Amino acid sequence: MAEAEATMLKVAAGENGGSSPEPAGAGSRKTYEAYGIRWLILFMFVMYSTSNAFQWTQLVIITNILEKYYQVNIIRSSPRESILYLPLLLKSRSLHWRYHGLP
């Protein structure tokens, strides 16, 4: 495994021994910086997702009361929300990337 990592690092650094042509501008290297605000945003997302999951489990206890009050069928709305979550998340992420750039 260490050999594979070393090979990946050599390829990333441009030390491929001339086996393949270097891309244009291979001498310039990108540097990435991780900001503390990203950890805050990640923490907020995890807390929101956790609270959402706990709310679903708590509302299951009083389904009959909620169904009468809101006049909806909660048994069908929970799977619907779970199924639509991922496609809508991916679509919103692609829109964000299109208009605001990659994260």
Image (spheres, rainbow, N blue to C red):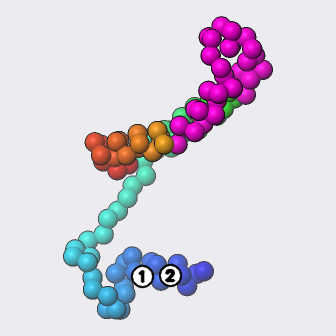
Please provide percent x and percent y for residue 101.
30, 48
Q: What is the number of the mark on residue 45?
A: none
Please provide percent x and percent y for residue 79.
63, 34
Residue carrying label 1: 10
Q: Is residue 94 above or below residue 10?
A: above
Please provide percent x and percent y for residue 48.
57, 31
Q: Is residue 68 above or below residue 34?
A: above
Q: Are marks 1 and 2 in contact (CB under 8 Å)?
A: yes
Q: In screen coordinates, is 44 left or right of 103?
A: right
Residue carrying label 2: 6
| Residue 75 among those drawn in magenta | yes
| Label 2 CA crowd tier, 10 Å (few <14, some 14–19, many 20+) | few
The three-letter code of the residue at mark 2 reads Ala
Q: Secondary structure at mark 2?
A: helix
Q: Please, what is the dominant secondary structure of the magenta stretch?
A: helix
| Residue 17 among those drawn in magenta | no
